[in-house]
Image (spheres, rainbow, N blue to C red):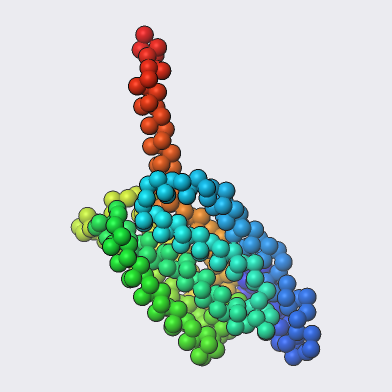
C-alpha cells in the first residue's frame, strides 16, 4: 500500500472533487480551502512569506549597496530573485485554486509563470557563472539572459501545449494516475539532472580549468544534482504507479518551493552583500588607523 502525498490523500481528494464538481455546491469549504489540507497550505505559505519578509527587511540596505557597487549583474539577479519570490509566495497562498473548477485556467497560468521565473533564475545564474568572463559586463549579462530566455521560453511553450492543448494535468497534485503528466516531469527532471551531472563531471576532469574557481558554485551544483536526482527517482516511481513516488515527489516539491530561493540567495547574493560590509569595515578601520586611534596599542 502506497503512501499519500503530504499531507493529503490524492485518491480521497479525487473522489471528493468529482463528487463536488457534479453537484451545485462545487465551491464548498473543502473544495476551496482543504484540497491539500490547511496545515499544508499554511506551512507552505508561511515559509515562503518569511523569505519575502527577510528580503523586505534588508531591502533598503541592499539597494544602497547595489547602487554603490553599480553591478549590473547583481542588480539583475536581485530583481529576478524578488520577482520569483513574490510569484512563489502567491503560488503557495493560492493552493486551493487547483481544486476550484472555475480557477483551473488561472491556476495553470500562475503555475507556468511561477515555474518560469524560478527556472530562468536557475538557468541564467548557472549559465552566467560558466562563462569565462563571468565577473562583469552588460554584454555578457545580455548574452546569458538571451540563452536562458530561449530555454525557458521553449519549456513554457512545451508545457503550455501539454496543459492547454492535450489537457495534461501537470500542475494538479490530485491527479496521480496520468501517464503524460509523469512522463513530462520525468523528462524535465532528467534534463536538469544531466546538466548538473555534466558540470560535476567536468569539475573532476582535466577540463576543470574551464569552470569558475568558486567553491560555493560547486556546493550549489552538488546540492542541485542530488535534489534533481531524487526528484527524477520520485517521478519514475510515480510513473510506475508506486504510491511512495507520489508522496516523495510532493515532499520534494514542498522543500523546493520553501528552500530553493533562500538557498540560492545565501549561496550567491549573500556573499556579495556581506563583502560590501567587510569593505566598509576595512575602510573605517583604515581611517581610524590613519587618525591615530590605534597608536596606543603600539606603545
Residue at horizontal 28%, vertical 50%? 213
Where does residue 30 sit, x and y in percent of width and height?
Answer: 76, 76
**Quarter the N terminus occupies:** bottom right
Depth check: 98 or 124 in front? 124
Name the residue rendered at 44%, 68% in the picture.
119
Compared with 283, 233 (above or below) is: below
* Quarter of the picture holding the C terminus: top left
Q: Is residue 179 visible?
A: no
Residue 279 vs 13, above or below: the answer is above
Q: Residue at x 42, y 64 (%)?
A: 122
Q: Is residue 206 visible?
A: yes
Q: Is 264 rendered above or below residue 38?
A: above
Q: In this view of the protein, which residue sits in the foreground, 249 or 24?
A: 24
Identified at 40% across, 23% down, the residue is: 288
**What percent of the width, then of the height, locates residue 94?**
65, 71
Identity of the residue furthest to the left in this view: 206
> In the rendered image of this protein, does residue 58 appear above or below residue 114?
above
Quarter-of-image position of residue 100: bottom right
* Residue 117 x, y percent position in the rendering: 47, 68
Q: Nearer the viewer, residue 188 or 245?
A: 188
Left or right: residue 187 compared with residue 247 = left
Amino acid at each position: 500500500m502506497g503512501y499519500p502525498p503530504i499531507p493529503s490523500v490524492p485518491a480521497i481528494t479525487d473522489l471528493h472533487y468529482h463528487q463536488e464538481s457534479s453537484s451545485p455546491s462545487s465551491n464548498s469549504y473543502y473544495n476551496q480551502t482543504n484540497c491539500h489540507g490547511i496545515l499544508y497550505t499554511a506551512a507552505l505559505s508561511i515559509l515562503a512569506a518569511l523569505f519575502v519578509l527577510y528580503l523586505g527587511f534588508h531591502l533598503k540596505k541592499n539597494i544602497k549597496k547595489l547602487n554603490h557597487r553599480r553591478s549590473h549583474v547583481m542588480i539583475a539577479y536581485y530583481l529576478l530573485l524578488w520577482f520569483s519570490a513574490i510569484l512563489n509566495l502567491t503560488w503557495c497562498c493560492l493552493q486551493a485554486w487547483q481544486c476550484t473548477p472555475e480557477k483551473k485556467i488561472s491556476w495553470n497560468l500562475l503555475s507556468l509563470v511561477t515555474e518560469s521565473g524560478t527556472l530562468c533564475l536557475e538557468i541564467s545564474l548557472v549559465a552566467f557563472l560558466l562563462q569565462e568572463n563571468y565577473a562583469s559586463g552588460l554584454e555578457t549579462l545580455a548574452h546569458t539572459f538571451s540563452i536562458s530566455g530561449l530555454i525557458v521560453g521553449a519549456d513554457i511553450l512545451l508545457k503550455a501545449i501539454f496543459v492547454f492543448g492535450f489537457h495534461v494535468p501537470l500542475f494538479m497534485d490530485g491527479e496521480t494516475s496520468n501517464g503524460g503528466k509523469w512522463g513530462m516531469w520525468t523528462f524535465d527532471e532528467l534534463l536538469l539532472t544531466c546538466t548538473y551531472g555534466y558540470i560535476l563531471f567536468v569539475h573532476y576532469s582535466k577540463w576543470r580549468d574551464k569552470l569558475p574557481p568558486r567553491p560555493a558554485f560547486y556546493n550549489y551544483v552538488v546540492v542541485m544534482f542530488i535534489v534533481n536526482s531524487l526528484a527524477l527517482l520520485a517521478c519514475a516511481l510515480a510513473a510506475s504507479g508506486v504510491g511512495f513516488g507520489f508522496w516523495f515527489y510532493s515532499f520534494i516539491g514542498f522543500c523546493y518551493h520553501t528552500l530553493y530561493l533562500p538557498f540560492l540567495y545565501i549561496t550567491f547574493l549573500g556573499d556579495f552583500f556581506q563583502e560590501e560590509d567587510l569593505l566598509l569595515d576595512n575602510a573605517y578601520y583604515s581611517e581610524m588607523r590613519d587618525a591615530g586611534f590605534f597608536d596606543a596599542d603600539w606603545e
